[in-house]
Amino acid sequence: MLDHLPILQVIVPLLAAPACLLLNNARLAWLFACLAGLISLVISVALLVQVQQSGVISYMLGSWEAPWGIEYRIDLLSAYVLLIISSLGTIVLLAANTGIRQEIAADKQSLFYVLYLLCMAGLLGIVATGDIFNVFVFLEISSLATYALVAFGRDRRALLAAYQYLIVGTIGATFLLIGIGLLYSMTGTLNIEDMANRLPVDTNSGTVYTAFIFMIVGIGLKLALFPLHLWLPNTYTYAPSIVTAFLAATATKVAIYLLIRVQFSIFGADFGGELIQPIFIVLGLLGVFVASTVAIKQSNIKRLFAYSSVAQIGYMIIGIGIGTSLSLQGTLLHLFNHALMKGALFLALAAVVYRIGSTDRTCFNGLAKHMPWTMAAIVIAGLSLIGVPLTVGFISKWYLVLASIDSGMWPVALLIVLGSLLAVYYVWALVESAYFGKADASATSSAPIKEAPLGLLIPLWLLVIANVYFGIDTRLPLEASASAASFLMGGGQ
Amino acid sequence: MYYDLYNYWMVIILMMIGLYIVIKPSNLIKKLIGLNIFQTSVFIFYISVGKVSEGTAPIFSSTHSVYSNPLPHVLILTAIVVGIATMALALALVVRIKSAYGTVEDDELQEQDH
């Protein structure tokens, strides 16, 4: 049983999805989906422990030997990302029963869980597999489920957002497919490990460079790398709030993982370094500043945090661009931390939507009086987003600043700190109106607004407490990311 | 020499035609047709990569010793299935956009929401 953990990690949610369809009852489907989520969370914890104790786990699907058969390969990096996906996916799932009640029609709710689990299975699969074509298939499984999840949104603009995301996402995935094809024609293998070993022979070939660029651009579309981020704000704004929390916490993280895997594991840390590293740093910084500035002007808070996500992705890209072991650790830390804070923020917005039905800025005036717990969660998660000490956001930004100073890039360090100030601005504006603003007379005349139900508050506060806990007791993410980063830089695999 | 790479030239031409059709027309269905052409060009690329000169169909026989590489064909079967699923989902979305907005022209859709 223990030997089969790598495949069970993917199989459990994948098989639980059609089972939810058979249950055909929203509440039962939710309980069943939560069970599947918890099982995959336990599996990912067990995998992380196993990898830390005994090194890389290699699992041969159907016992076919590695380069010919499909291999599932769990190293420190993938075990770490698997843990992020399964834990965040499960916590958001716990909130889903209450969270989707207002936003999705009752007869479609059990279908929601089917798509949710399929998406989660796809994301877990991308990380668990050691076969590059498998990555493409799992990417499409998760993407197709995502498009349908986004289209669940109440606003009709959700349909347009889903369509736009589908076009961009398919182009991105097809670019990745072209890159995989070019690499296959050069190496004759699809196994990531095997491919990495065969590649250095032909480093100077134009085909390899073309493959590299196709793959980077394709993944860039998927992870909303500035300026390829245009699909993200609409998708996050019009998708149901639970879906937004899930996507913000997991989907972009997996795309970052894929970028790291392609850049560091397949091509090697030095490949295209002089060309691609400055591009990453510049695009990352531009993303931070442009997206944060646009975020300040947004009147819809959900869209504001969507732009803030683009900015936070910028920080992770800067870490990859600097390209040292320390900066990579910063990126991996921010992966974990950003999942925690954006998961918390979007769940809090789900609570606001549940009670008020809108996330317009004017709705937040004086809201702290009516929903004190929800607003307190937004404040703490917002502080974490800014990077205030004693929250997780501080740790990762600290490491990114350290890494850029360490590589002699003073301006980059300065700009990272300046970028955080923009976050202070938009978080403060929200907090100010919630705590010190006066609600419209017309809005308060109707029934008083109550605090969000416990079904949403408990998962929300789980994430908020995690935001603070991992900001103080930093051992788990620090150790895992440090060894994952040195592992990537060291052997190149 | 150029004739040797005939397949690859066609792949690039089809790819560019596909991408252009995705970007240019404002009709949502036409965009999907472009997307389909773009994906198909990648399928042709994979199949061309699998061709081994002098090779025959990869079915074992005593009269032949050189075979084409069957792996890219198998990969592309998977990719075709993925492409069909994407197209079905996209068309379903267009049907719902049509019933929600009453049009499938991108510029008219933008006007309605602003």
Image (cartoon, coloured by chain):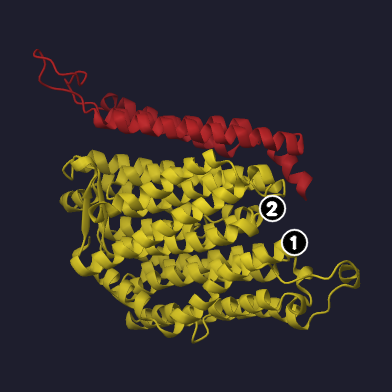
User: Is disc 2 surrounded by few (<14), some (14 to 19) or many (20+) residues within 10 Å?
Assistant: many
Instruction: Where is residue B37? Give x, y as percent.
Output: 48, 29
User: Is disc 1 surrounded by few (<14), some (14 to 19) or many (20+) residues within 10 Å?
Assistant: some
Q: Disc 1 sits on a residue from what chain?
A: A
User: Mark 2 — residue?
Assistant: A103
Placement of B94 over or under A463, stated as above or below: above
> Foreground residue, A446 or A249?
A446
Q: Residue at x 84, y 75 (%)?
A: A439
Q: Is residue A215 visible?
A: no
Instruction: Where is residue A451? Give x, y as percent.
Output: 72, 72
Name the amino acid type tagged 1: Ser
- Say whether residue A358 is left or right of residue A143: right
- Same chain shared by disc 1 and disc 2: yes
Q: Which chain is yellow?
A: A
Q: Residue at x 32, y 25 (%)?
A: B6
- The mark closer to the camera, 1 or 2, is 2
Q: Residue at x 60, y 44 (%)?
A: A25
The image quadrant that residue A236 belongs to is: bottom right
- Say whether residue A317 is left or right of residue A442: left
| Badge 1 vs badge 2, beta-carbon distance below 8 Å | no
Residue at mark 1 to residue at mark 2: CA–CA distance: 11 Å
